Image (cartoon, helix red, strand yellow):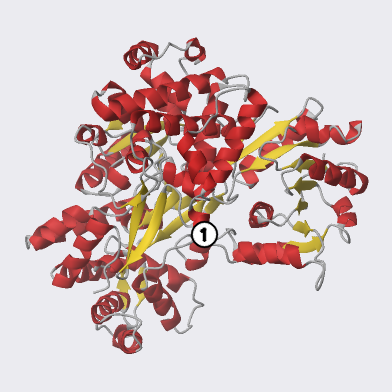
């Protein structure tokens, strides 16, 4: 059976166009078809779908240049072209009759080995396949992407009893490795896996809220990150999705399964008023502008009036929020007395019981049930993983305290999970394995084959003094007993950067000598990554800013998830990259220049990247920017990055020799004058503030070697020293301290 070399998507709505964009981003040439336009260009509907995904925010393409791999057409003139493709994905109207009509047309035109799949979110595949002949039935299945296809990790494969197992295996491998998806093979039942359980969990929360007389904003606090779920909680998510859609899906599931998916009566009143959420301007929440400011109002479910409410606070949550993991926080919530504890028991325990009852019904294993919720709904911890962590003795007491009958289905959850396809720290912890070294902020794991994994688990995975101390201890251990190191973690993001709290405290107290020492220690850490007697490979993902970006820059190699948003953003908080980032970017840009070429373009490129605090929109863009090398590897599936990084470190380890220290020419006063002139011009045109001119000048001084002559060649240590002095100077400025304080308070940059 041949590989998937070409694909086609039928239907250019938001989902179909998004799927086509993701296929193209993965390098698969794709034909995007929609019905012909009644007038004008016949391909207009497909073309508009492509243009919509090209301009969408957040971007639908990982690699916008790959839009050239998409060819648009229509379903009257271009169906014959489907004979040349290997996989056709139908993503048209969610209507059984319409889908069956399209499938009958596709059966007549596709090639003898073409796979045909439906992206239906709920119509059973066996009903769709009823109109197909025996041969086509073998090549037909469901492929349920979640919207937006680029960002949601889940891809449900839904085979029928007639689907060739080799087809399922082929798409599972393609989906996991090339498309970067988490694959769940779901049963052909109403709602499949993720929606069946996820919608039940949502309506259970809604019913419990109404029964207990709570408010949407309070419940969103109790069903958000505190449980390891998205910060949008339950009701902000419903507003984004559309409460009309949630209610329609719930009604359909209730009719198909005869299970209780009923929503509270008040939601019926909201739907009657067409308060569907964001798309109608109001739902559980409503934005109101007043005096240039925007306020978020919350719906009072008793009066159906929107009210301005203070941020929900429950005193008993303080100790719970201080706990490090969602599992620990959930256990504490289930033990609490009062509003939070009672709500959590009444809403969460039935969710766990329902998920357990669907093992073997919606998917074969507890792991697939959990993965459907983690990957499709953005949960950090699946319901059955949570049940395993809590243990049956604890759960039985919690059920009794809630006055809920014990669910024997929870006894079907095995004591230990099955391993996934990539190395997983979560799995290691679930099966009782422990790191070889650990602290409250970092751990060192043995990956086998002489390779270790250094994991950050500080707040936001930021790098403070405690992390730096641990990294030094880990270095000594690796030198003694191992041959290589991977740096990676399974947090939401790789690293938020250096510890700004510590820096602001030192700057406000005028403790500049401690700041000087901290810079030296940080530079010592990054230099050690480069010049250690063993290879270091960083496994990067998500947000990776400032000091975290410098960790990747100074590693021997990087394996990056395609979804990597990285950059040297220090200027935004009034400082500059002083952990080796400024030096490294200059050296990298210089290396791209031909011998004897004018060095100023390289200096200017490094200057623009740092002074403008540029952040990549993907790992591919990070490569274009120079933050990743061309030799660094990008994996579409973030779950595979640690395994791939270990493989690379093990390959580099035999006979490894650290690189020699580097020297480079600097531009000196000539380059410095040009860069400063450019910054002044930007200020005069209103693009940057007066203080940002000073910040840009300090970046320029480091990149140009200060006031040296253009012909001077310097060791990298000279540039590192200049970084440190510029950093120290900026920490002494009131404007920098104001920027640091504003970022810590609001999470946003201050343009002073």
Q: What kind of element bears circle 1?
A: loop
* Residue beneath disc 1: 58
Residue 626 drawn above or below residue 299: below
Direction from residue 198 to residue 109 in the image, left or right: right
Based on the displayed image, in which of its 4 quarters is residue 740 positioned?
A: bottom left
Which residue appears at 26% of the width and 47% of the height? 311
Can residue 646 be seen at all in this image of the molecule? no
Q: Where is residue 521 in the image (x, y as percent from the top left)?
A: 21, 54
Q: Position of residue 376 (x, y in %)?
A: 54, 39
Direction from residue 389 to residue 44 in the image, left or right: right
- Quarter containing the C terminus: bottom left
Q: Position of residue 28 (x, y in %)?
A: 71, 54
Which residue appears at 49% of the width and 16% of the height? 413
Q: Nearer the viewer, residue 638 or 700?
A: 638
Which residue appears at 48% of the width and 19% of the height? 353
Residue lying at the far front of the rendered structure: 303
């Amino acid at each position: 059976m041949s590989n998937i070399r070409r694909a086609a998507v039928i239907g250019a709505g938001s989902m179909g166009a998004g799927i086509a964009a993701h296929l193209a981003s993965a390098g698969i040439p794709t034909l995007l078809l929609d019905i012909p336009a009644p007038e004008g260009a016949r391909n207009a509907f497909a073309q508009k779908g492509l243009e919509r995904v090209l301009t969408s925010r957040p971007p639908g393409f990982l690699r916008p240049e790959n839009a050239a791999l998409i060819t648009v057409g229509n379903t009257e003139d271009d169906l014959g072209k489907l004979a040349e493709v290997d996989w056709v994905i139908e993503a048209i109207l969610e209507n059984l009759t319409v889908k069956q009509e399209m499938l009958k047309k596709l059966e007549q035109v596709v090639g003898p080995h073409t796979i045909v799949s439906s992206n239906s979110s709920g119509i059973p595949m066996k009903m769709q396949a009823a109109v197909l002949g025996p041969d086509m039935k073998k090549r037909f299945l469901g492929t349920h992407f979640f919207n937006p296809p680029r960002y949601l990790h889940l891809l449900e494969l839904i085979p029928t009893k007639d689907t060739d197992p080799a087809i399922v295996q082929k798409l599972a491998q393609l989906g996991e490795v090339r498309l970067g998806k988490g694959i769940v093979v779901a049963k052909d039942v109403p709602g499949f896996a993720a929606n069946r359980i996820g919608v039940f969990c949502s309506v259970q929360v809604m019913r419990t809220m109404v029964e207990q007389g709570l408010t949407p904003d309070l419940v969103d606090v109790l069903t958000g990150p505190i449980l390891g779920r998205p910060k949008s909680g339950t009701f902000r998510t419903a507003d984004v999705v559309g409460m009309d859609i949630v209610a329609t899906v719930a009604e359909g599931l209730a009719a198909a399964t005869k299970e209780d998916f009923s929503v509270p009566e008040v939601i019926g009143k909201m739907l009657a008023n067409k308060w569907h959420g964001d798309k109608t301007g109001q739902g559980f929440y409503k934005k109101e502008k007043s005096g240039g400011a925007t306020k978020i109002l919350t719906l009072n479910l008793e009066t159906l009036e929107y009210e301005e409410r203070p941020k929900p606070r429950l005193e008993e949550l303080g100790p719970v929020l201080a706990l490090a993991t969602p599992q620990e926080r959930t256990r504490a919530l289930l033990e609490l007395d009062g509003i939070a504890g009672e709500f959590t028991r009444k809403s969460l325990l039935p969710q766990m019981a329902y998920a357990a009852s669907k093992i073997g019904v919606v998917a074969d294993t507890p792991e697939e049930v959990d993965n459907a919720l983690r990957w499709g709904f953005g949960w950090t911890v699946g319901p059955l993983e949570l049940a395993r962590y809590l243990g049956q003795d604890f759960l039985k007491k919690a059920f009794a305290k809630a006055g809920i009958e014990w669910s024997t289905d929870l006894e079907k959850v095995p004591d230990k999970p099955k391993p996934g396809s990539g190395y997983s720290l979560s799995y290691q912890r679930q099966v009782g394995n422990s790191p070889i070294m650990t602290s409250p902020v970092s751990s060192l794991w043995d990956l086998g084959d002489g390779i270790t994994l250094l994991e950050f688990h500080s707040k936001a995975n930021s790098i403070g003094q405690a992390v730096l101390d641990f990294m030094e201890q880990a270095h000594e251990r690796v030198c003694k007993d191992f041959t290589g190191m991977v740096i990676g973690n399974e947090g939401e993001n790789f690293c938020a950067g250096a510890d700004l709290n510590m820096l602001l405290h030192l700057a406000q107290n005028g403790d500049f000598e401690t700041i000087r020492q901290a810079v030296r220690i940080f530079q010592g850490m990054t230099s050690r990554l480069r010049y250690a007697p063993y290879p270091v490979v960083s496994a990067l993902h998500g947000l990776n800013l400032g000091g975290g970006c410098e960790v990747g820059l100074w590693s021997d190699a990087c394996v990056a998830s395609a979804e990597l948003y990285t950059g040297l953003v220090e200027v935004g908080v009034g400082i500059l990259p002083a952990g080796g980032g400024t030096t490294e970017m200059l050296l990298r840009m210089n290396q791209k220049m031909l011998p004897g070429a004018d060095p100023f373009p390289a200096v200017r490129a490094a200057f623009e990247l740092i002074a403008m605090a540029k952040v990549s929109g993907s790992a591919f863009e990070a490569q274009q920017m120079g933050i990743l090398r061309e030799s660094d590897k990008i994996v579409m599936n973030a779950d595979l990055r640690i395994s791939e990084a270990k493989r690379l470190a093990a390959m580099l380890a035999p006979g490894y020799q650290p690189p020699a220290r580097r020297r480079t020419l600097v531009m000196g006063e000539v380059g410095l004058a040009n860069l400063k002139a450019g910054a002044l011009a930007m200020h005069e045109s209103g693009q940057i503030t007066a203080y940002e001119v000073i910040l840009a000048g300090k970046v320029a001084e480091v990149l140009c070697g200060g006031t040296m002559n253009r012909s001077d060649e310097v060791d990298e240590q000279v540039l590192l020293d200049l970084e440190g002095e510029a950093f120290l100077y900026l920490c002494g400025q009131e404007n920098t301290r104001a920027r640091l304080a504003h970022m810590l308070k609001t999470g946003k940059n201050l343009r002073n």
